[in-house]
């Protein structure tokens, strides 16, 4: 039995792994290293283009639940993420290159996976999972559009800059937790009201990089460029990524007017990213404006922020709960192009697509993850035909059915929802892992 997976990002790598673990011979098509997208810079699989954080690892958060479900079901992406994690309080952040290398090594050494380097210009024959990502090549995108008969939608994604740790002026910053949660793993860079006003005025008037290739420049809210957010109002950032709540400056004992937070981007702690500072300003403008943050006055920028295309399907009209194309079930999709948003969500879609494709090839019935689980809720959201205006979605408790009883307090309620989901996952685990 044989299947093809197109794309070795998080979703494609997870799908290939799940197929191979179930005895399916996999041909994994990946155009790197011969051709890279504007957002990629390494030859490794599962390269993280934006943040190095997989977000909250707490069960009171829906993405924390999704991670735990995947852990219990032998997800390759979660295994490598846990192996290469860096301190980030209550979040799961990873050493960016270490994580990608871990996934690449596991995929490349699996006896049932054959990696084929080169661009897929059309949808392959036979059973196939397309996980080519938000930067799908023009040729393959045209092939997909021709198949589904509908135009793919698109918006723009933006990545935050990286700075060297040694260039941060720690006399003007301090180590602390993120909003008084978890351990002191973040560099907090305070600004007075006067400093913030100067920074804000420079940011909203800074020159943006030119975006090529599209007329409709829509921006997804979850990855909005910081300059776009800033233009919504003078204090918008103070209620978003620069929120000072719970961050008391040890030098004054008071909360600053605004705080820029930096998070480790590698295990050694030699590289930090500016949390929430996705941007598409011109590179010289990034250096000028972001150096106005007092603790970053002499910052060494190891990577400037970039903006790139992000393409996704109108999945509720096209896909079923297994990420299969309704019009042609031999073809499945996975990853951000299905409308799931986020690293873990992409891995979850690849996981489910891989498991269900393998079971279909083996003549086994599908495993129906119910909506009470995060894996099931996400798959049912992107395949729900009643969704009238489809937009990319992070996993959240709003798409999971409520409890049949009342629980006091949001955190307690979310914890109870997670426990219910994990009980279901434990019941399904043997069927999923042992192909029963």
Image (cartoon, rainbow, N blue to C red):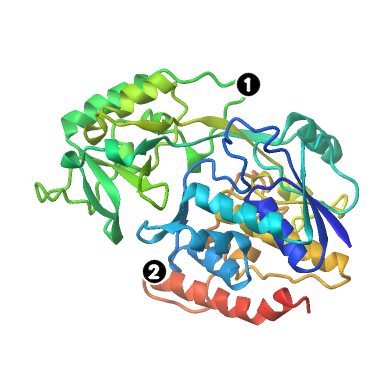
Quarter-wise, where is residue 389 in the image? top right
Horizontally, is 409 left or right of 377 in the view? Answer: left
Q: Circle 1 sits on which residue?
A: 215
Q: Could you tell me which secondary element the residue under label 1 belongs to?
A: loop
Residue at position x 50%, y 41% in the image: 50
Task: Report the quarter where the C terminus lies.
Answer: bottom right
Q: Circle 2 sits on which residue?
A: 411
Spatial CA span between label 1 and label 2: 43 Å
Q: Is residue 401 visible?
A: no
Horizontally, is 137 left or right of 300 in the view? Answer: right
Horizontally, is 428 left or right of 211 in the view? Answer: right
* Residue contact at pointers 1 and 2, CB within 8 angstroms: no
Looking at marks 1 and 2 on the same chain, the residue that comes earlier in the sequence is marked by 1
Rendering coords of residue 332 (x, y %)? 79, 52
In this view of the protein, which residue sits in the foreground, 142 or 297? Answer: 297
Quarter-wise, where is residue 160 in the image? top left
Q: Is residue 403 above or below residue 176?
A: below
Rendering coords of residue 406 (x, y %)? 45, 77
Q: Could you tell me which secondary element the residue under label 2 belongs to?
A: helix
Q: Residues within 10 Å of mark 1 (few under 14, many from 20)?
A: few
Quarter-wise, where is residue 138 in the image? top right
Q: Is residue 35 above or below residue 108?
A: above
**Mark count:** 2
Residue at position x 39%, y 67% in the image: 410
Task: Report the quarter where the N terminus lies.
Answer: bottom right
Q: Is residue 142 visible?
A: yes
Q: Residues within 10 Å of mark 2 (few under 14, many from 20)?
A: few
Residue at position x 90%, y 51% in the image: 126
């Amino acid at each position: 039995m044989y299947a093809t997976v197109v794309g070795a990002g998080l979703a494609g790598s997870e799908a290939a792994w799940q197929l191979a673990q179930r005895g399916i011979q996999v041909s994994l098509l990946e155009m790197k290293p011969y051709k890279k997208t504007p957002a990629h810079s390494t030859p490794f699989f599962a390269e993280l283009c934006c943040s190095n954080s997989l977000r909250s690892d707490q069960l009171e958060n829906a993405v924390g639940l999704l991670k735990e479900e995947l852990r219990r079901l032998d997800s390759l992406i979660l295994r490598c993420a846990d192996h290469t994690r860096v301190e980030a309080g209550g979040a799961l952040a990873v050493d960016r290159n270490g994580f990608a290398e871990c996934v690449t090594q596991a995929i490349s050494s699996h006896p049932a996976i054959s990696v084929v380097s080169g661009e897929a210009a059309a949808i392959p024959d036979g059973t196939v999972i397309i996980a080519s990502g938000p930067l799908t090549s023009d040729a393959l995108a045209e092939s997909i559009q021709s198949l589904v008969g509908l135009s793919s939608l698109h918006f723009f994604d933006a990545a935050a800059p990286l700075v060297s740790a040694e260039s941060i002026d720690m006399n003007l910053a301090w180590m602390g937790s993120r909003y008084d949660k978890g351990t002191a793993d973040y560099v907090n860079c305070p600004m007075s009201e006067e400093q913030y006003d100067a920074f804000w005025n420079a940011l909203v008037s800074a020159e943006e990089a030119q975006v090529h290739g599209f007329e409709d420049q829509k921006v997804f809210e979850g990855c909005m460029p910081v300059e776009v957010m800033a233009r919504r109002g003078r204090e918008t950032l103070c209620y978003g990524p620069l929120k000072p709540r719970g961050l008391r400056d040890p030098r004054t004992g008071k909360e600053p007017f605004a705080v820029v937070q930096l998070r480790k981007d590698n295990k050694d702690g030699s590289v930090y990213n500016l949390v929430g500072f996705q941007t598409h300003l011109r590179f010289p403008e990034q250096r000028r404006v972001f150096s106005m943050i007092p603790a970053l006055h002499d910052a060494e920028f190891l990577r400037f922020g970039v903006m790139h295309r992000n393409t996704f399907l109108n999945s509720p009209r096209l896909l079923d709960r297994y990420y299969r194309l309704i019009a042609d079930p031999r073809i499945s999709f996975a990853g951000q192009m299905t409308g799931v948003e986020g690293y873990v969500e992409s891995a979850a879609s690849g996981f489910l697509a891989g498991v269900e494709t393998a079971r279909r090839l083996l003549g086994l019935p599908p495993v129906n993850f119910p909506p009470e689980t995060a894996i099931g809720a996400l798959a049912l959201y992107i395949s729900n035909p009643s969704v009238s205006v489809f937009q990319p979605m992070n996993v959240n408790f709003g798409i999971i059915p409520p409890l049949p009883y009342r629980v006091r307090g949001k955190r307690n309620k979310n914890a109870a929802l997670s426990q219910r989901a994990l009980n279901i996952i434990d019941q399904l685990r043997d069927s999923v892992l042992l192909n029963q």
